[in-house]
């Protein structure tokens, strides 16, 4: 009886972690929008977002006396995970230069489909309930994020947005399936992923030129950077890793629908952005799909 209880508790913890990951990542506009309006370049914002988050997590691990050391083969894979997660952010921001943000959001939410397809390639087959949830949430995202008529759409933007989704999908699958890092804690995994991302952004910024502190002039700017580092970065990454390990990358990716939902709520409540009937229907469809997935788990689903 006890093993079944442990499985249920683990599944519940995985769903809760996935929900927290989605909601926390969806708070990006709360901190990023004021920074962009203050003239902070994207690469500068991403560098401090990752480096501050890594510093806070390192202090936490020191206080808890957690292990930092990893083996060489583990370090190589952790670096790859950091590059994948960092590229997901980088490709998304760059895609905004070529296509509307709504279309970019829709294309990035292809990542649950990519995760499911990668898992099929690895011979782990999602259940029909999971596939239905993927289709329904993607339909909801289409309602939420469809671009306005006549919007400028350029091929490089589409490629970048899809590349962002694919990077994120591979990150989730590797965290869940790799035996090489199965004994690495979520804290250690997240720390090295953050450090890799920070180094990557610093190098790209140096190559493109400009001060690493450009646009950061006030205490408010630093406050927003710290908020960006803690909530949609450190908390999101930690709970993302936990969820992927507990319930699998496909279900975790579906719970990522709370990212755009949270962003839309923040935009509506704090920034006065409109919430249309179509968007309301999209929200209802997305939430309904997630509830269906949670309440109708399939015994045959091996994820």
Image: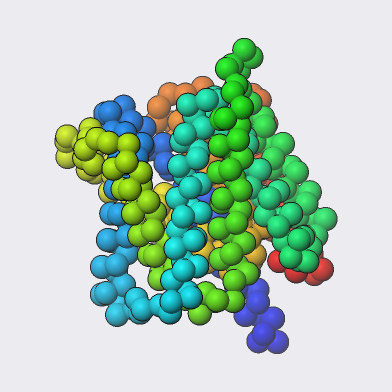
Compared across the picture, whether 9 is left or right of 236 comes to right
Residue 155 can be seen, yes or no: yes
Q: Residue at x 28, y 43 (%)?
A: 206
Q: Quadrant of residue 11?
A: bottom right
Query: In x, y percent, where is residue 17?
Result: 53, 61
Question: Of 179 and 286, which appears nearest the observer?
Answer: 179
Q: Is residue 21 above or below residue 280?
A: below
Compared across the picture, whether 57 is left or right of 123 comes to left
Q: Quadrant of residue 261?
A: top right
| Furthest-top residue in this view | 150
| Furthest-bottom residue in this view | 1
Q: Residue at x 33, y 31 (%)?
A: 36
Q: Residue at x 64, y 14 (%)?
A: 149
Query: In x, y percent, where is residue 124?
Result: 76, 66
Q: Is residue 76 above or below residue 50?
A: below
Q: Residue at x 43, y 24 (%)?
A: 272
Quadrant holding the C terminus:
bottom right
């Amino acid at each position: 009886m006890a093993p079944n209880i442990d499985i249920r508790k683990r599944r519940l913890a995985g769903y809760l972690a996935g929900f927290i990951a989605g909601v926390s990542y969806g708070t990006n506009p709360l901190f990023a929008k004021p920074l962009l309006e203050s003239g902070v370049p994207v690469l500068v914002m991403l560098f401090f977002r990752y480096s501050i988050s890594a510093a806070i997590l390192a202090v936490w691990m020191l206080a808890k006396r957690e292990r930092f050391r990893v083996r060489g083969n583990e370090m190589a894979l952790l670096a790859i995970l950091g590059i994948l997660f960092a590229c997901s952010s980088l490709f998304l921001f760059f895609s905004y230069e070529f296509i509307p943000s709504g279309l970019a959001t829709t294309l990035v939410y292809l990542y649950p489909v990519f995760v499911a397809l990668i898992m099929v390639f690895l011979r782990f087959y999602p259940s029909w309930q999971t596939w239905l949830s993927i289709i329904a949430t993607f339909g909801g995202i289409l309602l939420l994020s469809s671009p306005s008529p006549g919007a400028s759409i350029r091929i490089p933007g589409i490629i970048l947005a899809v590349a962002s989704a694919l990077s994120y999908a591979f990150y989730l699958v590797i965290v869940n399936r790799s035996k090489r890092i199965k004994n690495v804690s979520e804290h250690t995994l997240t720390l090295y992923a953050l450090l890799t991302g920070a180094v990557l952004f610093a190098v790209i910024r140096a190559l493109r030129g400009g001060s690493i502190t450009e646009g950061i002039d006030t205490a408010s700017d630093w406050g927003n950077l710290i908020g960006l580092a803690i909530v949609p970065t450190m908390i999101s990454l930690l709970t993302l890793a936990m969820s992927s390990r507990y319930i699998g990358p496909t279900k975790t990716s579906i719970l990522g629908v709370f990212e755009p939902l949270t962003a839309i709520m923040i935009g509506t409540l704090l920034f006065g952005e409109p919430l249309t009937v179509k968007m309301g229907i999209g929200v209802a469809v997305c939430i309904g799909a997630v509830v269906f997935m949670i309440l109708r788990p399939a015994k045959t689903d091996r994820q």
